[in-house]
Amino acid sequence: MSQPPITLIGDGIENPWNAQTMIHAAGMFGGDCRFLDRAGLAAAWAESPGFGEDLGQIEAIDLGSHYTPVVPLDNMDGAASIHGFRMPKGAQPALVAGNERLGISPEVRARADAAVQIPMVSRRLNCLNVAAASAVALYSLTRGREQKPITRARPEQHRPELLLLGAGQHVELGSSIRSAGAFGWTRVLVEDRHHVWFGCDRATLSEGRAAARRQRNPIHLVPTTPDRRCQFEEVCVITTRRVGDPLHRANLARGPRQLIAIPDESAVQLEAENWDRLGATVRFVHLDLPIVDFQYHYRLIASIALAEAARQIGAAARPTPGRPRRRPVYDRSLAVLAEANGEVVWLEELGSY
Amino acid sequence: MSRSKHTDPARIRAPRRVRAPHEPRGHADPGARDTIARALKELGIVLAAEPELREGHSSMPLPRLRVSRPRHGCHHPAGRADIVRVLRFFGESYTYGLHSIELLKGEGAPLDFSLGRLFVPGRIVLYDQPPSPWLLAGTLPEEEAARLRRAGAVCETAEDGFQTTIAWPGDTLREFMLFEVLMHEIGHHLIQQYKGKRPARVARTRDHEAFAHQFAARCRELWGDVGFQHAPPAVSHAREAQEPAAP
C-alpha cells in the first residue's frame, strides 16, 4: 500500500519567496503546502507581484484535527535524524518546517507526534534555507528506511569535490552554497557562466553576500570556466531527468578522486555540455522524484543531492563516555592549501538566503 | 665527581638498554666492571679488554617490523630491507624505545595523502602510497613543496592553484618515505622518549613538528652520499657523526 503524500506546513514563515519555493518543494513530492501565518506572510504575499499560487492557510488549532501524524522539522532536543526515520502511520501526515530564526512555535511542538532534524556538519551554520530543508526532509521521508545514517572513523576522507555549474540566479546559488557549507564542504568549485556570483553588479553582489563578513569557518569558492580540464577519476552529474542511477544507489562518497557536478538545468543544456573535460568516467545520477513535471529550483535539487552525499560520507562516531584518554598521535601527511585565487565567503553571510 | 649511573649519555645508555632491555639498570655498568678489574689486577689477574659496544652493529636488535599487503593499486615505496639498512646506519640511539615499525594499508581513499603516523609510545606506521605521479586537489604550502623538491620530487601546480601534480623520478619516493616520513616520525619519538617517556605531549605540536622536520633533514645530511646503490658505510663513521638528537 502506498503512503499518502506528506503535506508541508510552514510555521511562521516571513519571506514570501521562501513560501513560494516551499510550495514548489511540496509539489516535487506530490503534496500540498499550507502556512501557519504568524508574521504577516499573507500580507507580504498579497503585496508581492507575480505569485500565481494561492497561499493556503491553516490555523494552529486545526492542525491536530486535519493532520495525523504531525512531525516538526527542527533541531530541538530529542529530534531524530531524518535519515532512516520512519513516519508514524496516519491518514494525512504533515511535516512542519519553522521559521529559520525562531524555529517551531511551542503550540505546534505540543501537538507533535515526533520530531526530526537534518544532521549537519558545520558548527557555525545550524540550519539550511527553509525551502531547501523542506525538500531534503521530504526526500528522506519518502525514502523511509532506505536511508540509514552512516558512521565512519574518518568521514572527511570520503568527501568528494563539488562543482556547482551554471547557476542562473544568485539567490539559488547562494542557498546551494549555504547547504554545501552546512553539510561540511569547505571548498566548492563554482562555474559561474551567467555571472551571478563573480563579477556581477553591485546590487546583485550585495544581495548575494548580504551580511557583514565576520566570525570564522569560511567556505572557499573556486571559480572555474567551461574550458577548464580536470583529472577526476569519476564525475557524477546530478540531474532530475531519469537517466543513470537513482541518487540513493549511487556512491557519492569516493573521496577527492570524485567530483559531484550539479548543473542548474534551468540554465544549462545537459546534452550540449562536454562532461568528459571534467574526468575520466562520467556517470549520470538522477534524483528519482515521484513527480516528473515540477517547478525547478536549483537550491532544492542541490540541497537534496548534497544531503544524500553527506549521509553517505557519514559522521564520526561519538566517543563513548569513560573511554581512556587518547595518547598523542603525530601525523605526517600532505596538507593542501586553499587556492590562491577564488573567494572566501563566510557562512554567516549566507544566513539570509 | 660522582655521577649517577642512570645519567649515562644517550649514546652509551641507548645501546646498552636496547641490547638488554630486561636487565636491571646497573647491568654492564662500566664502573662496576672497572672495580672488579682493579681488584683482580691486585691479585695478578689481568682481564682482557671488552670490545666496545658499537652502535649500529649487525647484532643490533631492531624494533619489530611488520609489513602488510598494500591496497590494490598502491605499494610500499620503502620496504623492510630499506628500513633495516637505515636503522642500522643510525644505530640504537635512534631506535631506543621504539616498539614497532609497521607498513600498513592507508586508511582513506588512495589520494588522501596520509604518509605516516607515530602512536606514542613507540609505534610508527608508514602507509602505502599510490604510484607516481600524485594528484592533489589544491596547492601545497610553500615549505611543504620545498621539502618535496629537496627530496627529488617534481611539483607542478596549475596556474590557478586548482590541482598539484607531484612526480617522483627514480628512487626519490623511497628516500622520501625513509627520511621525510620514517625519520620524521622517529624525530617525534625521540622527543617523547628522551623527555620523560610520558604518554602525553611533552612539547607544543608546533615545536614537535619543527623539531621532527629539522631532525629528518639532519638525518638526510648524515646519510649523505650513501645511496642505496652503494654498500652501507662503516658503522663507526656513522657513529662519529651522530650525537643523539636531544630535543
Image: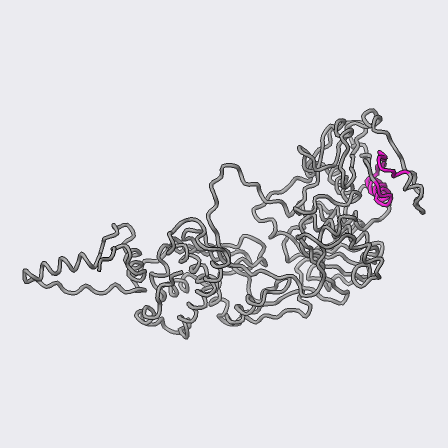
Outermost residue, left side: B43
Q: Residue at x 37, y 52 (%)?
A: B196
Screen quadrant of the N terminus of chain B: bottom left
Residue B194 picture quarter:
bottom left
Left or right of A16: which side holds A226? left
Outermost residue, front side: B1
Q: Is residue A32 magenta?
A: yes
Q: Is residue B13 magenta?
A: no
Left or right of B71: which side holds B19? left
Residue A143 picture quarter:
top right
- Residue B146: x and y in percent read 54, 70
Residue B124 picture quarter:
bottom left
Q: Residue at x 59, y 59 (%)?
A: B111
Q: Nearer the viewer, residue A263 or B182?
A: B182
User: In this rendering, is residue A226 above or below A182?
Assistant: below
Q: Residue at x 58, y 60 (%)?
A: A335
Left or right of A102: which side holds B119? left
Residue A8 seen in the current view: no
- Residue A13: x and y in percent read 82, 39
- Residue A163: x and y in percent read 73, 57
Q: Nearer the viewer, residue B230 or A126?
A: A126
Residue A250 seen in the current view: yes
Magenta residue span: A14-42
- Residue A297: x and y in percent read 83, 49
